[in-house]
Amino acid sequence: MKNFTPDLDRLKAMGRYRSVGLPAGVDFSSNDYLGLSTHPALRQAAIEALQGGIEIGATASRFLRGHRQAHEELESFAAAYYGCLRTLFFPNGFQANYALITTLIGRYDVAIFDALCHASMRDGLHAAQCMKVKISHNNLEAFEDALKKPIATGCNKWILVESIYSMDGDIAPVRELLMLAEKYDAILVVDEAHGTGVSGATGRGETEGFAHNRLI
């Protein structure tokens, strides 16, 4: 069996060694900027759900016996909240992006993505084995240049961005990108993970009010 001590020592020397520790101090590093993990209303909702007899654990995939009334209610609420026909929830955002991309984007499609897109989008694109074009961050001209190029008949062009980029905090030009999608017969995928609750007229994200068949 390999001795990993030299590898660990090398990581320590490079300042790249990491260990798990309990959180302390003021939180400036997680995604809990809305404080939802300790919100009293959510805590009470969880207590009431448990007292009301909600199942503990998934029990099975939703295609078998894992689909519950709570799923129906959550997804119906979300569809009404975002003003769309249907919603589908995943355990986390990484799985959502990965599943969406690998399911919808075909091998011979072209995915035009922002250079700062989240790793979940990049991993999905890698697994989809589609044609990929990386665009410098928020460069509308570069997006349009890529969209102008012809593709095979029956294939789709996709634009992938985040509404608010988690590491940089800047905003994608969603309205302009949607106009480009319409102009060049493309589909715009917007990751609203960091836009929901903090942007839009009523906190529904940068895509609020943009009901459009070219927007996902």
Image: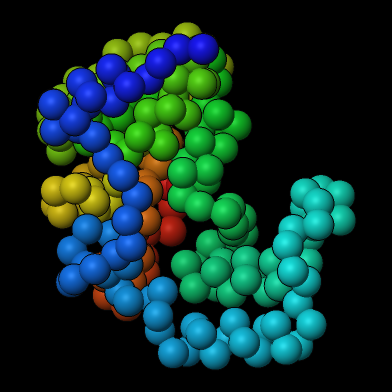
Residue 73 appears left or right of 87 = right
Q: Going 78% across and 67% down the picture, which residue do you hit?
A: 68
In x, y percent, where is residue 189? 40, 42
In x, y percent, where is residue 194? 30, 58
Kindly tell me whether residue 155 is visible in this rendering.
no
In x, y percent, where is residue 92? 51, 52
Q: Going 43% across and 47% down the picture, which residue do you hit?
A: 215
Q: Going 47% across and 29% down the picture, which residue do you hit?
A: 124
> Which residue is more in the foreground, 65 or 13?
13
Q: Going 57% across and 54% down the picture, which residue do you hit?
A: 91
Does 152 appear above or below 96?
A: above
In x, y percent, where is residue 41? 47, 89
> Which residue is more in the foreground, 48 or 216?
48
Residue 96 appears left or right of 72 = left
Q: Quadrant of residue 125?
A: top left
Does 168 appear above or below 144?
A: below
Kindly tell me whether residue 197 is visible in this rendering.
yes
